[in-house]
Amino acid sequence: MTYVLRGYFRSSASWRVRIALHLKGQPFEYVPVHLLRGGGEQHGEDHRRLNPMEQLPVLLVDGAPLTQSLAILEFLEERHPEPPLLPREPLARARARALAEVINSGIQPLQNLEVMQRLGATFGAERPAQLSWSRSYIARGLGALEALVAGSAGRCMVGDEVTFADLCLVPQLYNARRFAVDLDACPTLVAIESRLVTLPAFRAAHPDQQPDFEA
Ligand SMILES: N[C@@H](CCC(=O)N[C@@H](CS)C(=O)NCC(=O)O)C(=O)O
């Protein structure tokens, strides 16, 4: 089975998939798609044919395109069960998915590039207003996550093993810092992150390790 990942170094959804591929020891070719250059390569015909949502990531599985990072994580989990990225016990398993969804559907879509660009183009929002919009949704979502993990966390967000939730957390906290969100209200999340980022798979998946990285 061959994997080609179309991603962008700081795309949080692409980053989740990179971590999973590294954790599961699956080699992959990385094809950078620049989200800003020339108005955004995700809007080009080549990419739109693979993902009509004009977003990243796309994982080509033996040439067949798969979109939506969490669906990709589920696919990788089924295809390469070791090491597991979901707990065995059903309630803990559902909790890991729920925490991942707080980020995947409760934070990321509200602060993504397309939304910020639309706030500017359609409503005339200047950059500070766009940033304030994103910051508020990130802070709200992370505040909820901090409260939720009080009932589930060990060394990771659910217990002591890495799950989908942790794969979503690390990129979202990176984004939070880019948007200057105050993380003092999220000590548990930051402590978990500090442990995760020492793992080799998380290090390899970091934006600054990607060939398209820009400082
Ligand atoms: N739910 C999607 C979200 C994909 C998404 O929003 N990707 C962003 C990068 S993290 C993107 O491609 N944005 C392009 C744009 O906003 O134009 C997933 O998890 O794959």
Image (cartoon, rainbow, N blue to C red):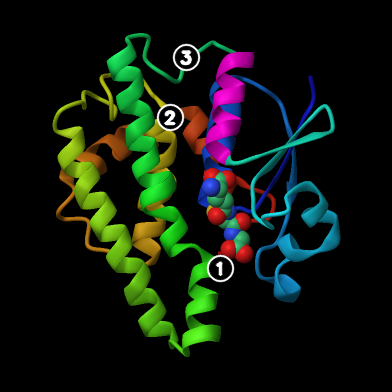
Pick the residue in front: 2 or 103. 103
Task: For ligand 1, tell me if the residue under mark 1 lies within 8 Å.
Answer: yes
Q: For residue 138: magenta? A: no
Residue tagged 3: 84
- Contact? badges 2 and 3 (CB < 8 Å): no
Residue tagged 2: 164
Disc 3, SS = loop
Disc 2, SS = helix
**3D distance between C-alphas at marks 2 and 3:** 10 Å
Q: In the rendering, at what x and y percent does residue 48 appear?
A: 78, 56
**3D distance between C-alphas at marks 1 and 2:** 24 Å
| Crowd rating for badge 2 (residues with CA inside 10 Å; few <14, some 14–19, many 20+) | many
Asked if residue 195 can be seen in this view, the reply is yes
Task: Answer with mark 1 or mark 2, whichever residue precedes in sequence.
Answer: 1
Q: Residue at coordinates 21% horizontally, 23% vertically from top-left?
A: 154
| Crowd rating for badge 3 (residues with CA inside 10 Å; few <14, some 14–19, many 20+) | some
Q: Which residues are magenta?
A: 69-79
